[in-house]
Image: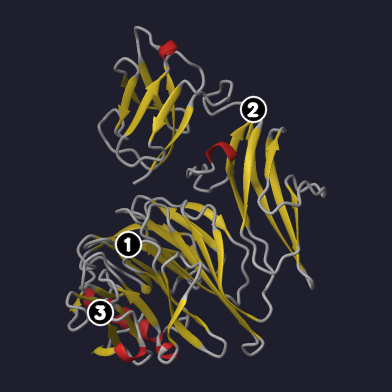
């Protein structure tokens, strides 16, 4: 029965009309490969600076490439054709370096942290640079193939759907190269939404991008829980792909826009180092007129260098009066003017590219950015994106305290606290709360220092997310972020 499921997967995968544009991480930090437009057709490109600039590697074979992936070995890259042929290059994909490795391998391809490993989605993998493939049994999987992604070693992710259930996708996790899979989440997406999965830089990190709705999601616990980190304003006729990078929080979103029979052709790389909350926009290839699309996001000004996630599985900017917010603009186009309306009340508050604004009124705030070029205008509104609170989640005066310092924040395994001397008392301890106000743990302090390992009072690892820490002698709390 399980082999039948995976035979269905193989047949379906061969029938899917995959995009002509792909992106994959290289073995080095900042290195990516991508397929995108040239002045007249398609090419395989390589970048070593996170997509700020690209080098054309192969414009001869690119039109045949249905999927690409890079090995952990520098210079080795693979592609598959519509006919199922797997090609291998050990010279960065230069046209004369391609060698036929295998027949009958379908897209998409996944790379691995193991040298010489390449995956034919969830169906099979090779451990000898594509010469031979080992089939996967897929025990525990059900439904029809939607998407797959390999993890760091033997782990991976498998996404499926059922014909009779149109509003659910089923996410499975494996720890033995797709031979046995366990259902870990049922996602409320339409079966025909274009979904992509890509792993993060740490074990258990997975990004999900719904390219149909332009939503980005992040999970630090193998997909058990997702946080919606961003919503982008992108048109449906863009070709879009995502891939995780080789540093914590690093994510790439590639968009290719071709129109008017190739009169206009542009490549855009959205590059994030904070799990997709904010992006830098790179435009390494341009031909003709650019489209015009308003895009932005924000963080609290005091924490603009760290990753702060929102509540209820959706990221939004949260803080207390007065709240300083830094806005990050990554709009597309040859833009002449920016008009920011930080309260969506019809009044322009700033004409800067990346402004900072102080909110002095509590409650929800929607933000609107209007941009202009010589021909057109585009507007993007983020509804209820900023929440300004009078008090913090502990019900006290919400001014963030400087009496407790901590590092690193965010943290994965251990966070170190230093407590101001004037708080030292006979009963010297820190209290860890979740966002519902429940005490997760009580930590005794040694003089003015303490350590938390991210576990609750039962010794169990806490779920990733925001926690609040306060000293037993103070009324205010400090936010910390636990990741996996």
Q: Position of residue 375 (x, y in %)?
A: 79, 73
Quarter holding residue 17: bottom left
Sequence-first disc among 3 and 1: 3
Please state if 105 lies on the left or on the right of 357 as rendered: left
Q: Are marks 3 and 2 in contact (CB under 8 Å)?
A: no
SS for tag 1?
strand
Q: Nearer the viewer, residue 348 or 209?
A: 348
Judge whether residue 459 can be spotted in this image.
yes
The label nearer to you, 3 versus 2, is 2
Left/right placement of residue 187 relative to residue 375 reads: left
Badge 3 local density, few (<14 within 10 Å), some, or many (20+)?
Answer: few
State how the image is colored: secondary structure
Residue at the image point whose x is 76% and y is 48% from the top: 350
Comparing marks 3 and 1, which lies closer to the viewer?
1
Label annotation for residue 390: 2
Q: Nearer the viewer, residue 397 or 265?
A: 265
Closer to the camera in the image, 54 or 480: 54
Mark 3 vs mark 2, CA separation in Å: 58 Å
Task: Give the labeled residue for mark 3.
Answer: 4
Chain-order first, disc 3 or disc 2: 3
Quarter of the image with the N terminus is: bottom left
Q: Dot 1 corresponds to which residue?
A: 172
Question: What crowding class fits label 2: few (fewer than 14 Cα within 10 Å), some (14-19), or many (20 or more)?
Answer: some
């Amino acid at each position: 029965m399980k082999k039948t499921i995976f035979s269905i997967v193989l047949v379906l995968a061969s029938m899917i009309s995959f995009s002509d544009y792909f992106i994959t991480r290289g073995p080095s930090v900042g290195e990516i490969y991508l397929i995108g437009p040239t002045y007249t057709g398609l090419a395989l490109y390589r970048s070593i600076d996170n997509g700020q600039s690209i080098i054309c590697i192969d414009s001869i074979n690119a039109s045949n490439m249905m999927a690409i992936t890079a090995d952990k070995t520098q210079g080795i890259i693979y592609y598959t054709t519509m006919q199922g042929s797997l090609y291998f290059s050990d010279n960065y994909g230069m046209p004369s370096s391609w060698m036929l490795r295998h027949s009958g391998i379908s897209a998409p391809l996944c790379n691995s942290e193991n040298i010489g490993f390449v995956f034919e989605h969830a169906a099979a993998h090779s451990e000898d640079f594509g010469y031979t493939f080992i089939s996967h049994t897929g025990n525990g999987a059900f439904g029809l193939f939607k998407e797959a992604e390999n993890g760091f070693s033997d782990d991976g992710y498998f996404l499926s759907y059922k014909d009779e259930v149109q509003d659910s996708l089923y996410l499975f996790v494996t720890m033995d190269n797709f031979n046995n899979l366990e259902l870990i989440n049922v996602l409320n997406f339409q079966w025909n939404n274009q979904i992509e999965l890509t792993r993060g830089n740490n074990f258990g990190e997975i990004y999900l991008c719904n390219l149909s709705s332009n939503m980005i999601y992040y999970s630090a616990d193998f997909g058990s829980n997702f946080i919606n980190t961003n919503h982008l304003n992108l048109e449906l006729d863009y070709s879009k792909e995502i891939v995780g990078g080789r540093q914590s929080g690093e994510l790439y979103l590639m968009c290719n826009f071709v129109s008017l029979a190739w009169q206009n052709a542009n490549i855009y790389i959205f590059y994030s180092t904070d799990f997709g909350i904010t992006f830098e926009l790179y435009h390494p290839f341009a031909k003709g007129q650019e489209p015009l699309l308003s895009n932005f996001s924000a963080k609290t000004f005091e924490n603009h260098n760290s990753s702060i996630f929102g509540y209820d599985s959706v990221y939004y900017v949260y803080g207390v009066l007065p709240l300083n917010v830094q806005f990050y603009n990554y709009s597309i186009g040859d833009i002449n003017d920016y008009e920011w309306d930080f309260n969506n009340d019809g009044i322009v508050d700033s004409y800067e590219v990346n402004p900072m604004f102080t909110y002095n009124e509590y409650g929800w705030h929607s933000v609107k950015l209007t941009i202009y070029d010589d021909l057109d205008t585009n507007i993007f509104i983020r509804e209820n994106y900023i929440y300004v609170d009078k008090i913090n989640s502990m019900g006290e005066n919400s001014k963030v305290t400087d009496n407790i310092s901590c590092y690193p924040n965010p943290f994965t395994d251990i966070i170190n606290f230093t407590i101001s001397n004037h708080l030292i008392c006979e009963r010297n301890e820190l209290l860890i709360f979740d966002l519902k106000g429940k005490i997760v743990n009580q930590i005794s302090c040694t003089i003015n220092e303490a350590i938390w390992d991210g576990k609750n009072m039962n010794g169990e690892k806490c779920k990733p997310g925001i926690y609040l820490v306060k000293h037993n002698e103070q009324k205010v709390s400090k936010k910390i972020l636990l990741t996996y």
